[in-house]
Image (spheres, coloured by chain):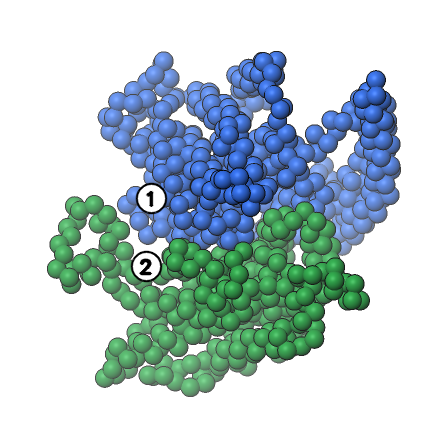
Amino acid sequence: MNDSGMVAAPAAATSQGAAARYRVWLAAAVVLAILPYVPGLDSDFGRSLLSQMGIAAVFALSYNVLFGQTGLLSFGHAVYFGLGGYAAIHFMRAINHGLPIPIALVPLAGAAGGLLFGLLFGAVTTRRAGTIFALISLGVGELVYAATFMLPGYFGGEEGITASRTKAPSLFGLDFGSQVQVYYVIALWALVAASLMHAFARTPVGRICNAVRDNPERAEFIGYNTQRVRFFAFAVAGLFAGLAGGLHAINYEIVAADAVSAQRSGAVLLMAYIGGAGHFVGPILGAVALTWLQTSLSGYTAAWLLYAGLFFVVIILFAPAGLSGLILMHGPIVRTRAFRRVLGTYVIALVPAAVMAIGAVLLIEMSYRLSTQHELGTRMRLLWVSLDAGTPWPWLAATLMLIGGFLAFRKTWRRVAAAWQDASDEARTARFAAGAR
Amino acid sequence: MGPRVRGDDSVTTWPMLELATVSLLNGVVYGLLLFMLTSGLTLIFSMMGVLNFAHASLFMLGAYLSYQFGRWVGFWPALVIAPLACSLIGAAIERYGLRHVHRSGHVAEILFTFGLAYVIEELVTMIWGRNAVANSVPAVIDFPLFSVFGSSFPAYKGLMMAISVAMFVFLYLALKRTRIGLIIQAALTHPQMVSALGHDVPGVFVLVFAIGSALAGLAGVIGGFMLLTQPTLAHAVGPIVFVIVVVGGLGSLAGALFASLLIGIMQTFAVAVDYSLLDLFRALGIGVTRTSPMYEFYSIKLATAAPIVPYLLLVLMLIVRPRGLLGTRDV
């Protein structure tokens, strides 16, 4: 996490670099604009999925202001998402009752709520860093979650608070009758929030956050109050989490206790880490991947949380820099001749990996069927095969696939490692040659 | 989650004394249960510096395994087998997981155990289903031991208290008075030196993790039938365990015992008190009406607020004494 790309900014930002950065944002805006009309996503389901991804991306980015940028591991970030969401939904109710403000501005109320509670709780929790901070954030999360049930007047208990996004004055003809309008509002806010967080990481305060993450003692020595820096980052993270909560309120028209739950706090941590906390786009990648995993897999399997958990553990064990780290790793060797061999070994290693994965999936799905869905019987269709989980044969076959796949994968992985070694050697030689010239 | 104190039918002349005695007893029982849960975590944290988020999951595994073995071989063998099985699982987690993550630092270690908690919860669901299993108190330890004010005190609670106290004594002596305890403590701060003296440091870590997991499993055997044995059990007890660790002082065994008892007793008394801030205001003659702001907040009964008592204590402790009750070092 420490060797992040976020720190390695160009020493002097040239105007050319700035222009390239604007092009990236422009490209992002164009992509966001055409996404809801891309075949496959141009249904209400697809647009709703995109909306969820947008919300998750803002939330995960706000989490990374704490985690990736300042080195604060929080287990209770959903508190600011949820409390921002509650602020937004109450604001929406006020609009429903005649407050003359367009719905598109509701996320601002969410951001204000997130900021307010970020300041309130941050004043206490950021007194400490590291492990204690992680535990305190967990405690505050539980506190707020329990409080939502104790104050049903404001939080609505289990059922939550509802409001309507259509019963409001319209702005530019937006009436929020269709999902695509909701999507565009979310996309616009997501783009604004992402660019603001990106800019924040490049301000002097953002840089000092990195310093506090990497070496708090030294940051103290050059005259910064680390606690104040942590507090500042915490408030900013709370603000953007609240904004995401406001988008959530618009999208679902309901905010309930699950918005502040430990599950949501855990989910955002998974998103940021799986995507890669070391790079700005990492959390976005993670948010998109996990949201997709959740919505698409949960339709097919009851075990999607197990897959998400296993995926997370595998990432921690083998790719601590996350998905974005995995992709960026290939940057230096992509121009070498040996890179083709690397790709070739990937394809070879993929076969036993797939066999291993299929074996694991079969075992997991059969076990789930037997333990949680008795009533459906033992006959089932899995990955294009029908089988009977009541007989030993599928179990035996799946176990063999798992073990055999694993052993073969270990063998093929050595070839991947060898090819990698060659490619990175070649890249290094090329770099030296370029330097000598 | 705290054990509820029910009103007794028998007529007593000392209602307040009865309430206090029964609540205190229940509070101590609950507190010692919490200590059982925390002791293994404290051991692992103080010796390895690893904050094990999967600890409550191992506790849950202990509950499920004792339920399963109890059905096959009876309660007493299960009381031994389940913790042993948990220690093997813990050793495997250390050897094949944590050891590799160790390089990437403490945050990666915490996150690894955090991910593991997800995986274990789902694996438990996969094997035993989503609903609670019928893990009732075994008949051999389900008889009244003695009675207080007409309500009887069951033997399994007595067994639980005995095991909990034994855990404390065992850990205290093992860490402070034995050679292996000294080596373990030295391995945390000076791994290279201990290794150079010929001790197997990675082996020591596996051992510590295995013992910590066994303690979690043992707690699970008893806690399993005092709480509800279901896949959400780990999540239900997990946060409160961390509260105890912080309030007691990170890595302090005596602090953990003290904090467990404190939280157990506070929560049990809170459940028994049926008053709110509103009642206090009225007693003091401060007028609060339905229209005054925060009326809803004032009218929360203390009994309803009992679940958040530990977390309030946590925040308070952080403000007043960040290192915890008996903590010696700031982390």
On the same chain: label 1 and label 2? no
Mark 1 surroundings within 10 Å by alpha-carbon count, few (fewer than 14), some (14 through 19), many (20 or more): many
- Which residue is found at the position 60% from the left and 37% from the top? A277
Mark 2 surroundings within 10 Å by alpha-carbon count, few (fewer than 14), some (14 through 19), many (20 or more): some
- Image quadrant occupied by the C terminus of chain A: top right
Residue A6 pos. (x, y %): 60, 31
Residue A100 appears anywhere in the view: yes
Q: Which mark is residue A155?
A: 1
Examine the image and state in which quarter residue B166 appears: bottom right
Q: Which residue is mark 2?
A: B304
Examine the image and state in which quarter residue B262 appears: bottom left
Q: How far apart are labels 1 and 2 at the CA level?
A: 16 Å
Task: Please identify which colour was used for chain A in the image.
Answer: blue
Q: Chain of mark 2?
A: B
Examine the image and state in which quarter residue B167 appears: bottom right
Instruction: Say which element carries label 2.
Output: helix
- Which residue is found at the position 78% from the left and 24% from the top? A334
Residue type pointed to by label 1 = Phe
Residue type pointed to by label 2 = Thr
Q: How many marks?
A: 2
Q: Taking B92 as reference, is B100 above or below it?
A: above
- Which residue is found at the position 62% from the left and 75% from the top? B176
Residue B156 pos. (x, y %): 50, 78
Q: Which one is nearer the viewer's eye here, A394 or A304?
A: A304
Q: Which chain is green?
A: B
Q: Which mark is residue B221?
A: none
- Image quadrant occupied by the N terminus of chain A: top right
Q: Chain of mark 1?
A: A
